[in-house]
Image (cartoon, rainbow, N blue to C red):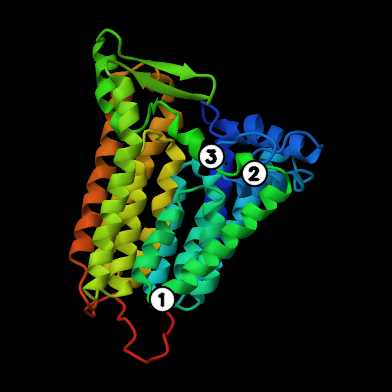
């Protein structure tokens, strides 16, 4: 069996296993699909409320597209299977682009990493909206140099489904020389979405997803909640885990929690701007795309995760695209962060759904697993920031590495 054939066999098996686990693991890892997405889809299709247009919504408006599209595939075996089929089909397109003819060791390792991460993370990586954005993000990152207009279009579309790919767009605008093309295409996509929303009468809900996030409390799994979670574990008065029925998630509370909640959004903004400024400085100093973009993209994505007061388990899928590109470009330097990411995926799977019943009652073991996962996220962000600071002007040739194209030379396919 060829290397490419082996990868495709693994692709099918990983997606089948992950889809199956969604039906058998505890705590409803696929619950969002039939409890939330399907009712939204049916309501919109039947002429009822249209999230993000006729009512406030927690997601950007293009998130409704895959939700409704899955409804058109439910004839296969119901809405849950339709969602899994849709995600698998999108993954297959990006996977084909990544693997190519199967001759590149870097691309092979990147593809294997993606599959291993998906398997270790489990069904939450498939049965959430983030699963739709991951293949768009991977394809966009791979096309940034050769087809920047198409790359920007894909990343902008992904951003209007879930906000996080904006971090990749920001890193690209900083690291890619043809940044005007990226900005222009992203602006065109955004303008198209906003015009369509306003034409449908949803102008006052156009940016409702921003307000929906800033008003949230401290979600149980977010890194910032560790102080309150461990107080709850220790039985400290006024520190406990509770369920917020308005946003359907578990949160933590304790002394001075309102001040912490108020500080988190500004902290996130300042952290993201600081990382972006660091990347811009390195780009101004002449850092190459190959050396700068993957590390900057990972640092920005992790800034969104680490300083976020929301910590949903599917957020871990955001780190797939930067690490995939890092492995494609320079697999030797990116092996360690790739291994760390796989451990993060495994620990996340243990936290949700496997240990979640224990976590919500402030069990010490579950809290320890979650804390270890969050510590790894912080360590990985630190590594990425250091890589940005040390990004050389020219990526030296190395085993498994890729040299940037010389000036006035037509770019070749990545190694």
Which of the two labelled residues, at mark 3 and mark 1, occupies the earlier sequence position?
Answer: 1
Residue 133 horizontal/vertical position (percent): 53, 53
Would you say the residues marked 3 and 1 are in contact, meaning their CB atoms lie under 8 Å apart?
Answer: no
The residue positioned 22% from the left and 46% from the top of the image is 379
Quarter placement of the C terminus: bottom left
Distance of mark 3 from mark 2, alpha carbons? 13 Å
Which element is circle 3 on?
A: helix
Q: Position of residue 299 (x, y in %)?
A: 30, 54
Query: What mark, if any, has residue 203 been given in the picture?
Result: 2
**Which picture quadrant has residue 322?**
bottom left
Q: Tag 2, which secondary structure? A: helix
Q: Nearer the viewer, mark 3 or mark 1?
A: 3
**Of callouts 2 and 1, which one flags the residue occurring earlier in the amino acid sequence?**
1
Alpha carbons under labels 2 and 1: distance apart: 47 Å
- Neighbor class of circle 3 (other Cα within 10 Å; few <14, some 14-19, many 20+) is some
Label 1 crowding class (10 Å Cα cut-off): few <14, some 14-19, many 20+?
some
Q: Residue at x 65, y 51 (%)?
A: 86
What x and y, as percent, mark residue 321? 42, 58
- Residue farthest toward the bottom in the current orientation of the protein: 408
Q: Which residue is mark 3?
A: 209
- Report how far apart the C-alphas of labels 3 and 1 lie in the structure: 40 Å
Q: Taking 343 as reference, is 354 above or below it?
A: above
Q: Is residue 261 above or below residue 396?
A: above
Residue linked to disc 1: 104
Relative to 176, does residue 165 appear above or below in the rendering?
above
């Amino acid at each position: 069996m060829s290397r490419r054939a082996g990868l495709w066999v693994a692709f099918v098996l990983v997606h089948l296993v992950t889809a199956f686990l969604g039906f058998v693991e505890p705590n409803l890892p696929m619950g969002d699909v039939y409890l939330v997405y399907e009712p939204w889809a049916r309501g919109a299709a039947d002429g009822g409320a249209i999230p993000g247009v006729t009512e406030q919504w927690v997601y950007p408006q293009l998130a409704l597209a895959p939700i409704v599209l899955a409804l058109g595939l439910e004839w296969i075996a119901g809405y849950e299977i339709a969602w899994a089929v849709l995600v698998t089909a999108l993954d297959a397109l990006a996977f084909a682009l990544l693997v190519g003819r199967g001759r590149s060791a870097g691309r092979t390792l990147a593809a294997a990493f993606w599959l291993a991460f998906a398997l270790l993370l489990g069904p939450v990586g498939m049965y959430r909206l983030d699963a739709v954005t991951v293949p768009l993000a991977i394809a966009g990152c791979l096309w940034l140099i050769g087809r920047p207009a198409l790359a920007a279009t894909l990343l902008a579309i992904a951003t209007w489904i879930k906000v996080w790919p904006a971090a990749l767009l920001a890193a690209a605008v900083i690291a890619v020389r043809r940044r005007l093309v990226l900005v222009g295409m992203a602006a065109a996509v955004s303008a198209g979405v906003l015009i369509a929303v306003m034409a449908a009468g949803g102008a006052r809900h156009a940016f409702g997803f921003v307000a929906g996030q800033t008003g949230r409390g401290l979600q149980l799994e977010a890194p910032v909640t560790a102080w309150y979670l461990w107080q709850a574990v220790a039985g400290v008065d006024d520190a406990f885990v509770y369920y917020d029925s308005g946003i359907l998630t578990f949160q933590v509370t304790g002394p001075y929690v309102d001040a912490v909640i108020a500080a988190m959004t500004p902290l996130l903004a300042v952290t993201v701007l600081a990382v972006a400024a660091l990347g811009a400085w390195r780009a101004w100093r002449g850092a190459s795309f190959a050396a700068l973009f993957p590390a900057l993209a990972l640092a920005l994505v992790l800034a969104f995760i680490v300083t976020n007061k929301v910590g949903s388990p599917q957020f871990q899928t955001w780190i797939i695209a930067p690490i995939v590109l890092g492995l494609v470009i320079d697999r030797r330097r990116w092996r360690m962060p790739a291994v760390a990411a796989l451990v993060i995926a495994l620990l996340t799977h243990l936290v949700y759904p496997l240990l979640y019943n224990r976590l919500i009652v402030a069990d010490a073991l579950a809290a320890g697993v979650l804390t270890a996962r969050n510590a790894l996220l912080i360590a990985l962000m630190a590594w990425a920031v250091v890589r940005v600071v040390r990004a050389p002007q020219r990526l030296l040739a190395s085993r498994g590495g890729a040299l940037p194209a010389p000036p006035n030379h037509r770019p070749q396919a990545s190694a």
